[in-house]
Amino acid sequence: MKRYLCLSILTLAAAASAATTVNADTIKLSATVRDFMESHPDFQVDLGDDRDYVADTLGADGKPVYIGGAGTATTSGAANYNQWYNDTPGVNLTTTIDLVLDNNQAGPGGVYTFNAPSFFPIDSQLFGNENAAHNYYFTLELNTAFTYQPGLTFNVEADDDLIIFIDGQKVIDLGGVHPPQTASLDLDTLGLTPGQTYDFDLFFAERRKVLSTLVFDTSIEFVPEPTTAALSLLGGLGLLMRRRRRSA
């Protein structure tokens, strides 16, 4: 039993290292990007705010649940929306990128920032730019976790859609095709338990020329926390166990 436990811990350590790398003053999170063609019905559509086209709770598969019926101001129904955050042959192409959060100090803590006011992570990749200056049509999915302590905040600016779930519950909704919009979240208002680890799931979409923005700052130290390798391993273990419980 001890041998199998040691092997499991080593496997988890390797998985955690591959998914997320941390230094004292940075957190590097691995995110999934899916590229689409301009011809997709939900891309290059008219401008408009479009809130609440997904349910307040994540589905059992960890994805947003579309509740927009036959369509909303900027979406064309469940079948097309469900392609946004799922690999769909012939419709999208998938890659992974790193989002590097920096607190601009020598050690952990403080405010971590991701700053991409011009956010085009897959230019000339996958389906390419389609004769445009950038690759404008893509979604991004980030799945991570954190340990809640009182006083945590999350502030974001996004163009276009940005929807965030904590512990499977929707906490920010900037849905729609729009110029950069902002939202702020005080985690103390969510009824979380100090010391408890919670899932954090972020879903972003860039759906129209010519802007793309993703900027956020936060006092959250996402798993694994920017401390020691041992704590990183424990953080990765905690994240895997929570994911396993949610999918059971």
Image (cartoon, rainbow, N blue to C red):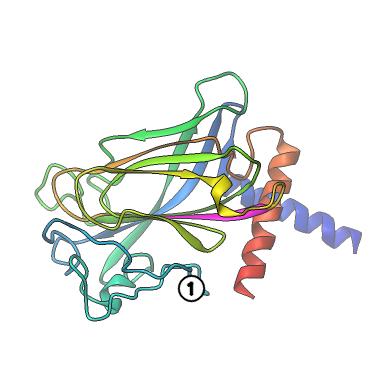
Q: Is residue 90 above or below residue 183?
A: below
Q: Position of residue 60 (x, y in %)?
A: 53, 75
Q: Residue at x 19, y 50 (%)?
A: 178
Left or right: where 148 falls relative to 171: right
Q: Main secondary structure of the magenta part?
A: strand
Q: Nearer the viewer, residue 84 or 7?
A: 84
Q: How many marks?
A: 1
Residue type (three-letter) at the residue carrying disc 1: Gly
Q: Residues within 10 Å of mark 1 (few under 14, many from 20)?
A: some
Q: Residue at x 62, y 22 (%)?
A: 107
**Quarter of the picture holding the N terminus:** bottom right
Spot the residue most to the right. 2
Q: Position of residue 82 (x, y in %)?
A: 34, 73
Would you say residue 240 sits in the magenta stretch? no
Instruction: Identify the residue position indicated by label 1 in the image.
Output: 59
**Quarter of the picture holding the C terminus:** bottom right
Q: Position of residue 228 (x, y in %)?
A: 71, 33
Q: Position of residue 208 (x, y in %)?
A: 16, 53
* SS assignment at label 1: loop
Rendered image quadrant of residue 80: bottom left
Q: Nearer the viewer, residue 163 or 145?
A: 163
Q: Residue at x 51, y 39 (%)?
A: 153
Left or right: where 181 falls relative to 236: left
Q: Is residue 52 above or below residue 105?
A: below
Q: Is residue 223 above or below residue 138?
A: above
Q: Which residues are magenta?
A: 197-204
Rendered image quadrant of residue 176: bottom left
Q: Residue at x 16, y 69 (%)?
A: 41
Q: Is residue 62 above or below residue 19?
A: below
Spot the residue most to the bottom. 70
